Image (cartoon, helix red, strand yellow):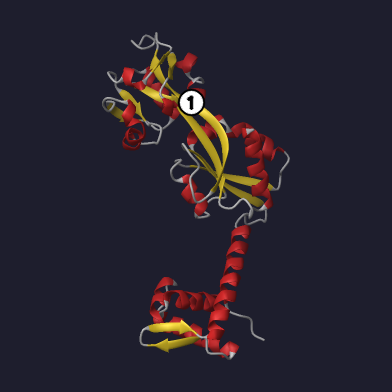
């Protein structure tokens, strides 16, 4: 017997859900005549009428309703299989797609990735630098296998687990009027030019998040995303800047900078590691997730 055709099942499922062959064709990027032909061929193959056609569109026959349920399961299985195969490179090696925000990449990942990959010669990792607010969506859409982001609470739609915490501080050059302070609120520094980026990545998003702690917006003349470049700009007197404490300490002595502790509540950040479904992970992805969670512990 001729095997069921996956594209025909896709257009049949779309027709049942859209209650229209023309809408199903649009959804599957086909012309209506091609969609109709695929459904007719499926009916001939099974020797059963699957759809009732009428002026308002289409609806499944009892046999079509049964096929719809089975076809949904078949297509879901195909999707999961394709997703699993995408976890391997062209040469058959296991490949993990990991998206993380820059702070985590610099502060936390080198050690854990070094230990994870040390005895796994058959595994490779594609590490993508992304913004925290994008990462859960990327995981939910299966663009990546694992994501690490910071937020006040776990983001819905993905399975999230606590990872690590850090703090951001205020970096100023030696000799700056604030340099004698050990800690302060950002409010105390608003008289001075501030270099971006900020927690939440843009000034508008940062103000929406932390604006209640500030009497007025900071004066920002220059946006600098790279941490080392930001510290160099601070050294040159172009402004002061917010930098993760663990990263800032790498540049203090060499660049003549001072790190001040920010007393604002938002200065402490919680990072989460997330996956789309923790029960449906390929073995290498599950092992990396476990390694990241053990690091958190």
Vertical comparison of 49 with 125: above or below: below
Above or below for 267 versus 283: above
Query: 125 or 103, which is in the foreground?
Result: 103
Of the 4 image quadrants, the one containing the N terminus is bottom right
136 lies above or below 29: above
Give the percent coordinates (x, y) of residue 187.
32, 21
Horizontal and vertical percent position of residue 168: 45, 25
The answer to whether residue 80 is left or right of residue 197 is right
Question: Badge 1 local density, few (<14 within 10 Å), some, or many (20+)?
Answer: some
Q: Position of residue 154 (x, y in %)?
A: 50, 42
Placement of the C terminus among the 4 image quadrants: top right
Residue at 42% from the left image edge and 22% from the top image edge: 231
Figure quadrant of residue 19: bottom left
Count of numbered circles on the image: 1
- Indicate left or right for 125 with 217 as reference: right
Q: Nearer the viewer, residue 117 or 179?
A: 179
Q: Residue 88: tell me if it is visible.
A: no
Which residue is at a point 57% across and 75% down the rendered structure image?
69
Q: Is residue 41 visible?
A: yes
The residue to which callout 1 is attached is 167
Q: Residue pushed farthest right?
A: 119
Quarter of the image for residue 292 reads top right
Nearer to us in this view, 94 or 171: 171
Q: Is residue 155 left or right of residue 179?
A: right
Q: Quadrant of residue 131?
A: top left
Q: Secondary structure at mark 1?
A: strand
């Amino acid at each position: 017997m001729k095997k069921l055709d996956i594209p025909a099942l896709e257009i049949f499922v779309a027709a049942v859900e859209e209650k229209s062959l023309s809408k199903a064709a649009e959804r599957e990027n086909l012309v209506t005549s091609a969609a109709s032909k695929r459904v007719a061929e499926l009916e001939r193959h099974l020797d059963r009428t699957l759809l009732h056609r009428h002026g308002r569109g289409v609806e499944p026959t009892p046999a079509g309703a049964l096929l719809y349920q089975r076809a949904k399961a078949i297509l879901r299985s195909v999707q999961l299989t394709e997703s699993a195969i995408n976890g391997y490179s062209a040469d058959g090696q296991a490949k993990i797609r990991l998206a993380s925000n820059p702070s985590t990449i610099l502060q936390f990942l080198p050690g854990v990735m070094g230990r994870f990959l040390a005895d796994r010669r058959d595994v490779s990792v594609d590490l993508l630098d992304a913004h925290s607010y994008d990462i859960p969506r990327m995981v939910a859409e299966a663009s990546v296998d694992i994501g690490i982001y910071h937020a006040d609470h776990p983001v819905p739609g993905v399975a999230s687990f606590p990872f690590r915490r850090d703090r951001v501080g205020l970096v100023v050059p030696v000799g700056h009027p604030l340099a004698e302070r050990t800690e302060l609120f950002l409010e105390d520094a608003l008289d001075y030019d501030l270099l971006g980026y900020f927690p939440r990545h843009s000034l508008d998003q940062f103000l929406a998040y932390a604006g209640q702690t500030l009497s007025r917006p900071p004066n920002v003349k220059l946006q600098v995303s790279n941490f080392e470049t930001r510290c160099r700009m601070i050294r040159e007197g172009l402004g002061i800047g917010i930098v993760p404490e663990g990263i800032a300490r790498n540049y203090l002595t060499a660049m003549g900078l001072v790190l001040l502790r920010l007393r604002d509540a938002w200065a402490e950040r919680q990072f989460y590691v997330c996956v789309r479904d923790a029960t449906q992970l390929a073995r290498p992805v599950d092992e990396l997730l476990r390694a990241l969670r053990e690091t958190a512990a």
